Image (cartoon, grey):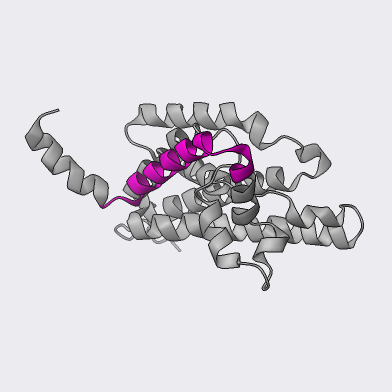
Amino acid sequence: MSAARLRVLLPRLTRDPAFWYVVALTVAAVVEDTISPDQLRRLMDWCSTNLANIRPGGHPVAAFVASAFIPQESAGVWPFFALSLFSVVAVLGARRTVLVLAGVHIGVSMLTEGLVWWRIHHGTLPWSDEHMWDTGPSYLVVAALTIAIATARPLWLRLAWVLCLAGAAPSLLEGIGHGDYTAIGHVLSFSVGLVVVLRMRRASSPVGITGDPVTVPATPQ
């Protein structure tokens, strides 16, 4: 790549939130691979959006923000999957992409933790699950992949994102038959992505078709 081309490309990249998110996930993957197991455990304990952290006596804002950047497992894979955000930014714009995907991350996390709270209070989960790890970018990335599959350009990118989501699906949906809350969260994220796609297509379709009025010949009396 020429220096002139690089000078044009760099400002565009640095204005794109997808670029910074991929960079942040890459840094997180390096950090997770570098720190000790005890340090990693403490990091997961702090940034998880579990009931202990998101209740008023915890640190809900910090947990919701940090958990979007700290994968719980397979940390090296998520920066690649997060490249799908470039396709989402291309169709939604930077601000709408941040609002939609942040909303998915926070909203789905709250719903799944609400399910955990309900099951704990009905005796189907132990109280220790208040501290269960629930961290990572998977909810927002699943929504991004869903949107990218339907809208990415060029078209071959859609196939790439289909393969990514299909390859990750067995892990993302593991335990759904037993009501695993993270698996349910991934289904919800996929559903939100579909809703966004359907709303985009409805907004871009013609509202109606107008034409010249049709004259109907009078029936002879």
Quadrant of the rendering where the N terminus is positioned: top left
The answer to if 177 sits in the magenta stretch is no
Magenta stretch bounds: 15-40
Residue drawn at x 12%, y 41% is 7
Residue 30 image-quadrant placement: top left
Check the image and report above or below for 14 versus 54: above
Would residue 112 be found to the left or right of residue 107 on screen? right
> In this view of the protein, can residue 207 be seen by the observer?
no
**Magenta span dominant secondary structure:** helix
Residue drawn at x 73%, y 48% is 181
Judging depth in this view, the residue of 62 and 158 nearest the camera is 62
Judging depth in this view, the residue of 102 and 156 nearest the camera is 102
Residue 71 image-quadrant placement: top right
Residue 99: percent from left, percent from top:
44, 61
Would residue 133 be found to the left or right of residue 151 on screen? right
Check the image and report above or below for 133 versus 58: above
Quadrant of the rendering where the C terminus is positioned: bottom left
Judging depth in this view, the residue of 26 and 82 nearest the camera is 26
> In this view of the protein, can residue 30 be seen by the observer?
yes
Judging depth in this view, the residue of 57 and 153 nearest the camera is 57
Check the image and report above or below for 91 versus 79: below
The answer to if 17 sits in the magenta stretch is yes
Would residue 14 be found to the left or right of residue 140 on screen? left
Task: State the count of labels.
Answer: 0
